[in-house]
């Protein structure tokens, strides 16, 4: 089944069956990042569109972030040779590379790249351009993850004002920004204010995108989380179920949004004392993550930790210990690999900095 998924993912990313089989072999063998096939491809190809598709494949579908970074480095080199270092295409590549770094948690490095992209966009276009709004939004997401909530809110507000000026209030981008601003208010325990913005986001999405759009599932989950914080647990369960139903219908039963919904549902059921039901939903969430990203992922470690907590409440000491060990072992492996990747990434970024007059990390 995994082989079939990879074949399907590769169908639009490379131009021949031979190359698809070569990349499939790389993945199956767990080859190193400097495998001869990928190295030769990056050294010889000047087809930016094809390379960008390959970067998206590695980043978004296969979660092979080192390979994705290598691909985008080659795209950067091509753009630098053709356009110099201040062209919008270079800024677009910085943004793509920032997404690669953000996924495994390289937030500070991603922020540097977004700042580089922002400076280019402002210079090439103007401060009210859509690319500026998008970059400010992405920077705000990183600050939010780093719990720099005031700074994140400021950037969200700047992005929102540009989008409202360019697109109007009734727009999905505006709705999305309202949604993320509300998540900050929720973190700040401003629950009533958060609920107002979540509801505003939901109303716009329903009007613009329709009641069954996948993005509505995420907003419903956020409203459910506010209700959980307010102690309205039964109402929260109902909203989580609505969210799961919409996500399953619009994005498929194995989408990450469905997995998040199952996990959140389990957390609330755990609070309600429905421990067996909670474990069932944890298991559903875990199965999706294992299918999509494999066991070596921090989300999997988090679910194991949640399950350990539930087993502890049930008085099952054996399973509590077993699931805690699974969680700790995965977390250790991920952190060790990140430290190894960091060394390679710094070498690559140092070379790029020297080429593009970027400040070294």
Image (cartoon, helix red, strand yellow):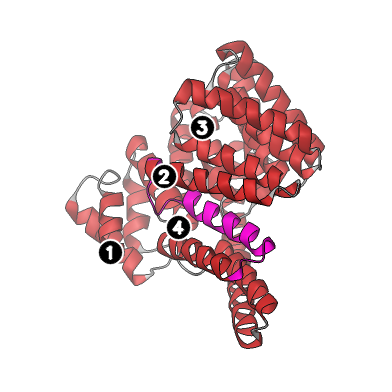
Of the two numbered discs 3 and 4 in the rendering, the one whose residue sits closer to the viewer? 4
Q: Which residue is mark 1?
A: 1
Q: Which residue is mark 4?
A: 64
Q: Which residue is mark 3?
A: 92
For marks 2 and 3 on the same chain, the one whose residue lies earlier in the sequence: 2
User: Does the magenta run of residues contain 259?
Assistant: yes
Residue 94 location in percent, x, y?
Answer: 55, 37
Residue 136 in which image quadrant: top right
Q: Separation of disc 2 and disc 3 at Cα? A: 13 Å
Residue 134 location in percent, x, y?
Answer: 59, 28
Residues in magenta, as a range: 250-275
Q: Separation of disc 3 and disc 4 at Cα? A: 20 Å
Q: Separation of disc 2 and disc 4 at Cα? A: 10 Å
User: Does the magenta run of residues contain 278?
Assistant: no
Residue 351 placement, left or right of 315: left
For marks 3 and 4 on the same chain, the one whose residue lies earlier in the sequence: 4
């Amino acid at each position: 089944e995994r082989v079939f998924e990879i074949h399907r993912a590769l169908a639009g990313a490379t131009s021949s069956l031979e190359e698809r089989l070569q990349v499939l072999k790389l993945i199956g063998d767990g080859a190193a990042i400097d495998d001869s096939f990928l190295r030769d491809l990056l050294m010889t190809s000047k087809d930016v569109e094809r390379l960008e598709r390959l970067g998206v494949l590695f980043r978004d579908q296969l979660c092979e972030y080192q390979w994705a970074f290598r691909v985008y480095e080659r795209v950067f080199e091509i753009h630098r040779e053709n356009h110099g270092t201040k062209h919008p295409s270079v800024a677009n590549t910085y943004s793509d590379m920032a997404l690669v770094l953000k996924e495994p948690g390289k937030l500070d490095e991603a922020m540097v790249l977004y700042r580089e992209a922002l400076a280019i966009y402002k210079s090439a276009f103007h401060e009210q351009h859509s690319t500026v709004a998008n970059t400010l939004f992405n920077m705000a997401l990183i600050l939010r993850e780093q719990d720099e909530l005031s700074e994140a809110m400021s950037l969200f507000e700047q992005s929102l004002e540009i989008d409202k000026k360019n697109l109007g209030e009734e727009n999905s981008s505006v709705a999305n920004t309202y949604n993320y601003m509300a998540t900050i208010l929720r973190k700040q325990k401003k629950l009533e204010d958060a609920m107002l913005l979540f509801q505003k986001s939901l109303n716009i999405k329903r009007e613009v995108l329709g009641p069954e759009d996948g993005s509505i599932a995420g907003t419903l989950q956020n409203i459910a989380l506010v209700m959980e914080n307010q102690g309205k647990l039964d109402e929260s369960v109902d909203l989580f179920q609505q969210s799961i139903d919409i996500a399953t219908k619009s994005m498929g039963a194995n989408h990450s949004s469905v997995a998040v919904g199952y996990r959140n549902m389990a957390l609330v059921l755990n609070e309600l004392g429905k421990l067996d039901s909670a474990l069932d939903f944890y298991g559903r969430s875990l199965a999706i993550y294992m299918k999509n990203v494999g066991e070596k992922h921090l989300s999997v470690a988090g679910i194991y930790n949640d399950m350990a907590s539930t087993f502890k409440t049930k008085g099952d000491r054996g399973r509590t210990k077993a699931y805690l060990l699974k969680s700790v072992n995965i977390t250790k492996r991920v952190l060790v690999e990140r430290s190894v990747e960091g060394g390679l990434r710094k070498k690559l970024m140092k070379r790029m900095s020297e080429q593009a007059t970027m400040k070294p990390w």
